[in-house]
Image (cartoon, rainbow, N blue to C red):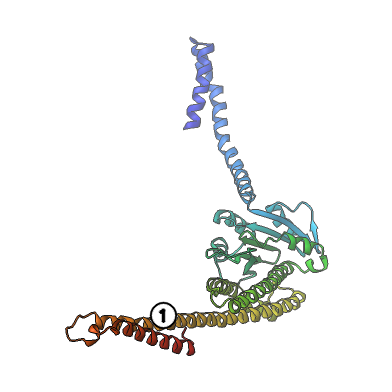
């Protein structure tokens, strides 16, 4: 109706302006002009139907390139294919060429952004939800021909004197979707960037030609190697804290120990659950994992076992050191209590004698003697000195 009313206004307006008194013109309007307007109105919905899908395609494409996409490239036979930086184009090229795959890198995408990408590559809905929410434990899940893996990244924070509310280890997450012709990496956290990994794999085309599983291996290998470096830094911190515990027994670094214990536990929660997924990748035959790459996963799993053993050892050593520190604190408190008790016992002697002779009884012969006052003072001094020597001899003072 809006088209008809608009057309009517456009038709009658010029007619009245050119021929204000012409009835023959009105008859012509009802004839030829009206047929032209009806033909235009009938053709207009067809043009709208044709243009709407194009606008939706442009909107989804712009949404996918909204700044969350870090990199998008297509690889075939270990080499990057030109003109593969667009999401839709990359998906088409990867599906058209045998052995090619698209590698898409995302950084903290929203649910809408990842949903549009999931529609292009057919990502499972449950895994997409986990990738958006983050805060997942390391795991591996299979959805038909798609593999979904979660890994924890970790970074050591350089600081001279750690405070109570600061962190020594900052963790993030990397989610990896692996399919027959694509690999999608989703990163959460301001560390663990994969640009260096992409450049390293592009310099090794013999490894990259094994497909998406080669990218998954590169991600796992890089994260586990970072675990090894992080474990060495924690070992150095542990040696420094352990030395300070026994060097300064009067002021043991209890807060540093608690903080380091907390950070080691967080690191342990990132490392230990990853053993199951990596064991599965190295021992189980999966359709999306190239057999040649599976052998490389065994090497990554061996490194992870080393890291796990070191983290468990650090945790146990921290527990023992913390227990020793608390024991030292208890011993120091006992020594203070013994000193206080010794001085209280020494002070009780003159207090008792003064209280006795301060009661002012009438029949106290010492009060009337000339030697009474110095005798009582001498008695106080002798008893106090005797107690002092006895406490010093026994180590109480």
Q: Along the horizontal axis of the image, is 211 left or right of 368?
A: right
Q: Identify the residue shown where x is 77% and y is 65%.
A: 99
Q: Along the horizontal axis of the image, is 196 left or right of 343?
A: right
Q: Nearer the viewer, residue 187 or 329?
A: 329
Quarter assignment of residue 385:
bottom left
Q: Identify the residue shown where x is 21% and y is 80%.
A: 359
Q: Along the horizontal axis of the image, is 257 left or right of 213?
A: left
Whole-percent x, y for residue 198 in the image: 75, 61
Q: Identify the residue shown where x is 52% and y is 11%.
A: 19
Q: Nearer the viewer, residue 326 or 221?
A: 326
Q: Nearer the viewer, residue 317 or 179?
A: 317
Q: Nearer the viewer, residue 105 or 289?
A: 105
Is 106 situated above or below 55? below
Q: Along the horizontal axis of the image, is 65 left or right of 391?
A: right
The crowding category of the residue bearing disc 1, from other C-alpha atoms within 10 Å (few below 14, some 14 to 19, many at least 20), is few
Is 272 situated above or below 136? below
Q: Report whether residue 284 is seen.
A: no
Whole-percent x, y for residue 50 in the image: 61, 42
Whole-percent x, y for residue 229 in the image: 70, 71
């Amino acid at each position: 109706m809006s088209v008809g009313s608009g057309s009517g206004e456009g038709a009658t307006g010029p007619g009245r302006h050119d021929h204000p008194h012409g009835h023959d013109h009105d008859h012509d309007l009802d004839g030829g002009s009206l047929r032209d307007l009806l033909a235009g109105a009938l053709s207009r919905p067809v043009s709208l139907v044709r243009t709407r899908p194009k606008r939706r395609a442009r909107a989804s494409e712009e949404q996918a390139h909204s700044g969350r996409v870090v990199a998008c490239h297509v690889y075939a036979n270990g080499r990057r294919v030109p003109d593969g930086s667009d999401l839709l184009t990359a998906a088409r090229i990867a599906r058209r060429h045998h052995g090619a795959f698209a590698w898409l890198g995302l950084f903290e995408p929203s649910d809408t952004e990842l949903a549009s990408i999931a529609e292009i590559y057919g990502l499972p809905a449950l895994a997409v939800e986990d990738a958006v929410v983050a805060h997942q434990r390391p795991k591996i899940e299979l959805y038909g021909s798609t593999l979904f893996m979660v890994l924890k990244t970790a970074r050591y924070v350089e600081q001279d004197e750690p405070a109570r509310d600061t962190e020594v280890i900052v963790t993030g997450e990397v989610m990896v979707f692996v399919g027959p012709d694509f690999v999608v990496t989703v990163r959460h956290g301001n560390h663990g960037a994969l640009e260096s990994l992409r450049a390293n794999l592009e310099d090794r085309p013999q490894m990259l030609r094994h497909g998406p599983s080669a990218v998954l291996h590169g991600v796992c290998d890089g994260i586990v190697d970072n675990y090894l470096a992080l474990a060495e830094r924690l070992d150095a911190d542990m040696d420094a804290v352990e030395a300070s515990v026994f060097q300064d027994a009067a002021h043991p670094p209890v807060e540093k120990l608690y903080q380091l214990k907390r950070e080691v536990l967080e690191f342990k929660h990132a490392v230990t659950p990853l053993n199951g997924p990596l064991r599965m990748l190295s021992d189980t035959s999966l359709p999306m994992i190239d057999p040649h790459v599976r052998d490389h996963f065994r090497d990554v799993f061996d490194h992870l076992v080393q890291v796990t053993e070191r983290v468990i050892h650090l945790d146990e050593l921290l527990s023992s050191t913390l227990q020793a520190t608390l024991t030292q604190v208890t011993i120091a408190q006992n020594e203070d209590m013994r000193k206080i008790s010794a001085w209280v016992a020494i002070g009780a002697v003159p207090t008792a004698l003064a209280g006795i002779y301060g009661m002012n009884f009438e029949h106290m012969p010492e009060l009337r003697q000339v030697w009474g006052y110095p005798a009582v003072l001498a008695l106080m001094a002798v008893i106090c000195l005797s107690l002092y020597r006895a406490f010093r001899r026994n180590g109480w003072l």
